[in-house]
Amino acid sequence: MRLDKYLQVTGLIKRRTLANEACKLGLILVNQVVAKPTREISAGDVIDIKLAKREMTVKVLQLIQGSSLKKAIRNEYFTVLRDIERRPEDSEDFWKDDPDGKN
């Protein structure tokens, strides 16, 4: 199964086009290597996902047969090894570089 399709069907990334773009931007790694959206994945692969608000590492347990998956059984197809919510530091001042000069 293609990487972008696997990410979408398992719900790790909401839409396939977003998964495709994340791969093209180098935000998705498979087995520590930047992966293209067309990469075929297999059981045992480790997928690193680095998005704006979250970093995850998951291990593929089994491949999906078909093009959809019930939400209740999604966790049978991967296991989460690491899940870090990314948020800005409280001390960081986002408005100091305001291009409009309003702040």
Image (cartoon, rainbow, N blue to C red):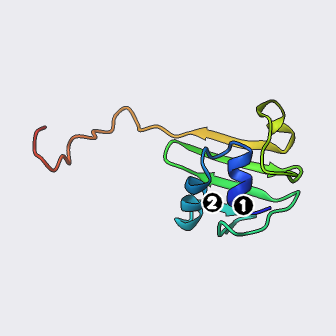
> Which one is nearer the viewer's eye here, 98 or 4?
4
Q: To which residue does mark 1 refer? A: 3
Q: Where is residue 21 in the image (x, y as percent from the top left)?
A: 54, 61
Note whether 24 is above or below 97 in the view shown: below
Residue toward you, 42 or 47: 42
The image quadrant where one finds the N terminus is bottom right
Q: How crowded is mark 2: few (under 14 residues within 10 Å), some or many (20 or more)?
A: many
Give the mark toward the camera: 1 or 2.
1
At a point 68% along the width and 49% down the height, the residue shown is 8
Dividing the image into 4 quarters, which one contains the C terminus?
Answer: top left
Q: What element carries label 1?
A: helix
Q: Nearer the viewer, residue 67 or 85?
A: 67
Tell me whether the residue at label 1 lies in contact with that at label 2, contact meaning CB atoms closer than 8 angstroms. Answer: yes
Instruction: Bin the neighbour count of mark 1 within 10 Å (Cα to Cα): few under 14, some 14-19, many 20 and up.
Output: many
Q: Tag on residue 28?
A: 2
All told, the count of numbered labels is: 2
Name the residue at 10% across, 45% down.
101
> Label 1 is placed on what type of residue?
Leu
Q: Where is residue 39 in the image (x, y as percent from the top left)?
A: 73, 69
At x 67%, y 44%, the residue is: 12
Between the C-alphas of marks 1 and 2, the distance is 9 Å
Residue 90 vs 79, above or below: the answer is above
Three-letter amino acid code of the residue under disc 2: Ile
